[in-house]
Amino acid sequence: MVEVATSILNIDREKAIRTLYDLEYAKTDYFHIDVMDGKFVKKDTSSMMREYCEYLNSISNLPLDVHLMVEDVESYIDSYLIYEPNILTFHYEACKKKEQVLEYIKYIKERNCRVGITLNPDTPIEEIYEFLPYVHMALIMTVVPGEGGQKMIDSTIDKIKKVKEYCVKNEIDIDIEADGGITLENAPKVREAGANILVAGKTIVSSKDYAKTILELKNA
Ligand code: DX5
Ligand code: ZN
């Protein structure tokens, strides 16, 4: 069984509170918060995601899985820590040099928050191996970051396989999360490749029965 993190990037803003409540009731394991700054990726979702985190802090105890698609990682860490996220994940490509990756990991941990690292589909998985012993999760982007509702890039499945093998071989016990274009059809092969957390936005939010879809993903 895998865990499911529902991406709330494309929920109907007019019905946000109702939708968030329904997703919690439908037993999503996490709310996946897609923070975009309009620089690292074209879209700027930061104020909308802060609004949703405010709601979630008052209506739900479910963990927040915050995905930072931002250039100025440190300032967004500070601004989202106030929502007491379960994990803050930043992009390897947002770091100007390798030392900065470790600096951000330390910065997040010093603030008593779990930390994840993620990378774009075209960044070789080997680039993050050296950091895996120091994080709680590797988030493997299975689409180019910046939009919901995209089709999965099939070649990213190999990256999930490789990072899983590397973790097993090196006895690194971390979560592996797959993010982008996850459907009921491709979820089984994503799980088999080694992901234990699946992020899904469109597959869940556009479905008629959130609970049924989430359960099917969990049993993929
Ligand atoms: C894309 C985001 C993903 C995306 C997932 O930049 O990081 O979390 O919103 O949504 P779907 O499942 O619709 O691809
Ligand atoms: Zn995401």
Image (cartoon, rainbow, N blue to C red):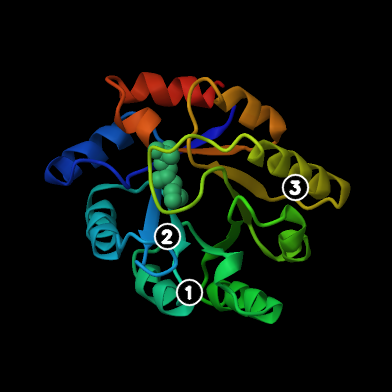
Which one is nearer the viewer's eye here, 209 or 21?
Answer: 209
Residue at mark 3? 163
Q: Which callout, 3 or 1, points at the residue further toward the start of the chain?
A: 1
Q: How many marks?
A: 3
Classify mark 2: helix, strand or loop: loop
x, y percent for residue 108: 54, 73
| 32 horizontally vs 140: left or right | left
Residue at image location 74% in from the left, 39% down from the top? 161
Q: Nearer the viewer, mark 3 or mark 2?
A: 3
Assign the C terminus to one quadrant of the image.
top right
| 45 horizontally vs 140: left or right | left
Q: Is residue 93 above or below residue 139?
A: below
Q: Quadrant of ligand 1?
A: top left
Residue at image location 39% in from the left, 54% down from the top? 34
Q: What amino acid is labelled 2 in the image?
A: Pro
Residue at mark 2? 85
Classify mark 3: helix, strand or loop: helix
The answer to whether residue 176 is visible is: yes
Residue at image location 62% in from the left, 37% down from the top? 196
Q: What amino acid is labelled 1 in the image?
A: Val
**Alpha carbon distance from label 3 to label 1:** 24 Å
Q: What amino acid is labelled 3 in the image?
A: Val
**Alpha carbon distance from label 3 to label 2:** 24 Å
Within 10 angstroms of label 1, few (less than 14), some, or many (20 or more) residues? some
Classify mark 1: helix, strand or loop: helix
Q: Is mark 2 within 8 Å of ligand 2?
A: no
x, y percent for residue 149: 38, 37
x, y percent for residue 183: 48, 27
Q: Tell me whether circle 3 and circle 1 mark residues in contact (CB < 8 Å).
A: no
Residue at mark 1? 73
**Alpha carbon distance from label 2 to label 1:** 15 Å
